[in-house]
Image: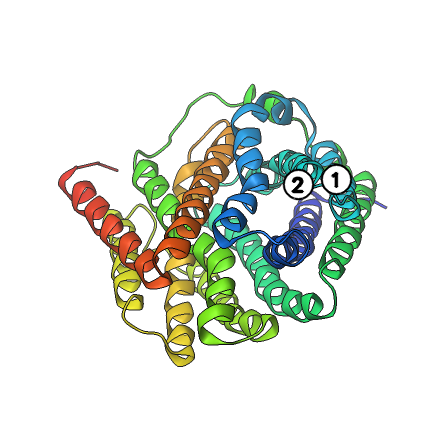
Amino acid sequence: MRFTQSKNSLIQTWTLDIASFIANVAVTMIGLALVYYLRGVFSLAPSLIGISTQVPTITYFLGCMFLNPLVQNLKPRHCVAIALIGMSCFLVLFVTTSSLPMAYVAIGIYGLFMSMLWPAIEAWFSRGKEGEELNHAMNGFNFSWSFGVGLATYFSGILIEKSYTLPFVVGIVLLLFTCVSVSLIAFLIPGMRSAASEKEAKEQEMVDHSTPLRYLCWVGIVLVYTGMSVIQNIFPLYASDMLGIGASQTGALLLVRGIVTCLTFVVLAKSSFWQFSRKTILLDQLVFGLLCLTGAFFHSIAFFILFFFAFGIVFAFGYCLSMFHGVSGCLNRTKRMAVHETLLTLGQIIGACCGGFIYERFSFETILLSYGIVTLVVVAVESAIRIRK
């Protein structure tokens, strides 16, 4: 069977989008289940849970920083397969050990392997694309993984109420299925099979046209991910302790954010007003800060539905702005995607660790108030700095 270049590109796009959806269902399910697993199996306090859930996040952060040379030298299909197999193996070790130190080791190495997965996929689908073509490819990927997050947060809550380990078992199966599927399709499709490593692809390009607006966007991705980390890791504890709702209801609330984020990605894929717009970058951060401040004064479930709805929009903008402006015009896309992933991971670490500490000693409202004030100060500083396109 002969494949044209356009058919190769279409198959690759669909393969990577579907793989991103399934893999992120697994990753999100595991991330949310980790909160309940550490409390139910190891009886950890909230502050320790906040820190412990960030073990894979910290190793992911380190992997994005230091494993990038390895990722650049591997073909994308090989890198993705190695990452998925490694993640699966160490998740098996995590759920089968009764030793907390060994559990930390297992979930930490799981994070290292995951640091090979997302930068490789992101560089793979964006290679050779600019402008509207990059926008459509990027937002197809974003819709896929964010839709996966939305479903995973809901179904994870249901699975957790049946067993602490069940979400991990389902996650492992999904990761291995993704590995087999991507490897098989990549082997059968010439365009995917022949995709060169980032190092080889970079040697074919000559001029870098990166935009300095990426620096403001990178600040934004750190900020919105502090909020995402609080929602994923601290809010379930607050919902259980103070709102009196279970895991499945919490999952349903988080599903609201996931659905709104997906829909926002669709809108962004069909528009360009936000591209290379300094005002949009700063406005997104400003709205996030005001949202946190507002959230500090409300305590009802009805309010949190509205809160997650608004946050879903803010989060989608922040993520798209960082990814698009970070990679646009860039030669080394694996490295830039690694920077993007490193910074969002830094936001997760700050959000969970600081959030867990503040929640245990003060309150959930204090977390939102603190993050809101810090964000507004950051926006004020950024507004005083002029960065040209």
Give whichever of 218, 302 is nearer the camera: 302
Q: In screen coordinates, is 250 left or right of 294? A: right
The kind of residue on which mark 1 rests is Phe
Is 111 rendered above or below residue 205? below
Give whichever of 365, 128 is nearer the camera: 365
Q: In screen coordinates, is 92 left or right of 46? A: right
Helix, strand or loop for disc 2: helix
Give whichever of 34, 312 is nearer the camera: 34
x and y percentages locating residue 89 in the rendered image = 78, 40
Q: How is the image coloured?
A: rainbow
Give whichever of 2, 346 is nearer the camera: 346
Helix, strand or loop for disc 1: helix
- Seen as rendered, the residue at the extreme bottom is 302
Numbered mark located on residue 38 in the image: none
**Which residue corresponds to the image point at 65% horizontal and 38% vertical from the top-left?**
104
Marks 2 and 1: CB-CB under 8 Å?
yes
* Figure quadrant of the C terminus: top left
Disc 2/disc 1 C-alpha distance (Å): 7 Å
**Which residue corresponds to the image point at 73% horizontal and 54% vertical from the top-left?**
168
Q: Which residue is labeled 2 in the image? A: 107
Res. 309 image quadrant = bottom left
x and y percentages locating residue 72 in the rendered image = 61, 25
Task: Estimate how packed mark 2 is, as few (under 14), some (14 to 19) or many (20 or more) residues with alpha carbons within 10 Å.
Answer: many
Res. 319 in view = no
x and y percentages locating residue 386 in the rendered image = 17, 37
Q: Which residue is labeled 1 in the image? A: 90
The kind of residue on which mark 2 rests is Ile
x and y percentages locating residue 136 in the rendered image = 51, 53
